[in-house]
Amino acid sequence: MKTFTWRSFFMVLFGNILIGLAVAILRVSALGTDPFTTINLGLSSLFDLSFGMYQLFFNIILLAIVIPFYRKSLGIGTIVNMVGIGFISDFFVLCISFITDDLSHLGIRLILMAMAFVIACFGVALYITPELGVAPYDAMAFVIENVSKQKIPFPIARITTDVLCVAIGFSFGAIVGIATVIFAFFTGPLVQYFRRHIAEPMLKQQGAMVPVKN
C-alpha cells in the first residue's frame, strides 16, 4: 500500500463510480460485460437478488479467501470497490431506464458499449494507480499464483478465472457478446494509457502527504 492522501482516495472513489457507470451502460446495451460482471449477473438472477447485493456477497466470500493468502493487495480501495460497484451500477441502470426504455437499435447499443469501455478503462486507471487496494477478484489470480508456488503464473491464472466466470455466467443466462471479447483483449493497453497520461500525473501534482498505517 502506498501512503494515503485525500487526492488518492478521491481518485479511487471517482474511479469506482466511473466503473459502476460503465457496468450499468454495458448491462443496458446487452452486448456482453466484463467476466466478473458476467458471473455476477448470471448468479444474481439464479438467486433472485439484485446485482449489487449479490456482488457484495460474492466479494465477501472472495475476500475471505484473499486475506490469508495475499492480504498485501487489500486496502481502502478494496472496500470501496467491493461494496460500491454493484450498487452504483444498479443506480445508474435505474437512471438510464428513466431516460429511455428503447435501446433496440444496434447502432446505439454499439456506441454505448464503446463509451462504456472507455469509461471503464479510465475508471480502472484512477482506481488502481494510487495503490490503495484492489478488488478481491483482481487479487484472486495472485492468490492462485502464490498457492501454486508460481507453477501457475499470473497471466494463466487470470485467464483461467476470467474464462470460468464467463462460462458460469453464460450458463445461468448472462449475455456474452462482443463487449466480453473487447474487455478481455483490450482493457490492459487503454488502462495503461490512462495511467501514464492522466492518473500518474495527477498523483505527482498532489500536495502534502498524510501518512496512514495500512
Image: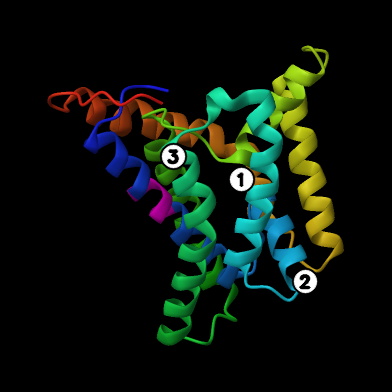
- The secondary structure that dominates the magenta segment is helix
Residue at 49%, 48% in the rendered image: 81
Tell me the number on the disc at residue 77.
3
- Amino acid residing under circle 1: Phe
Residue tagged 1: 183
Q: Residue 192's spot in the image, x, y percent?
A: 45, 29
On whether residue 17 falls in the magenta region, the answer is yes
Q: Is residue 179 left or right of residue 72?
A: right
Residues in magenta, as a range: 14-18
Q: Earlier in the sequence, mark 2 or mark 3?
A: 2
Q: Is residue 109 visible?
A: yes
Residue tagged 2: 47
- Quarter where residue 38 is shown: bottom right
Neighbourhood count class around disc 1 (C-alpha, 10 Å): few under 14, some 14–19, many 20 upward: some
Does residue 188 sit above or below 92 in this rendering? above
Residue at 55%, 80% in the rendered image: 103
- Amino acid residing under circle 3: Gly
Does residue 129 sit above or below 38 in this rendering? above
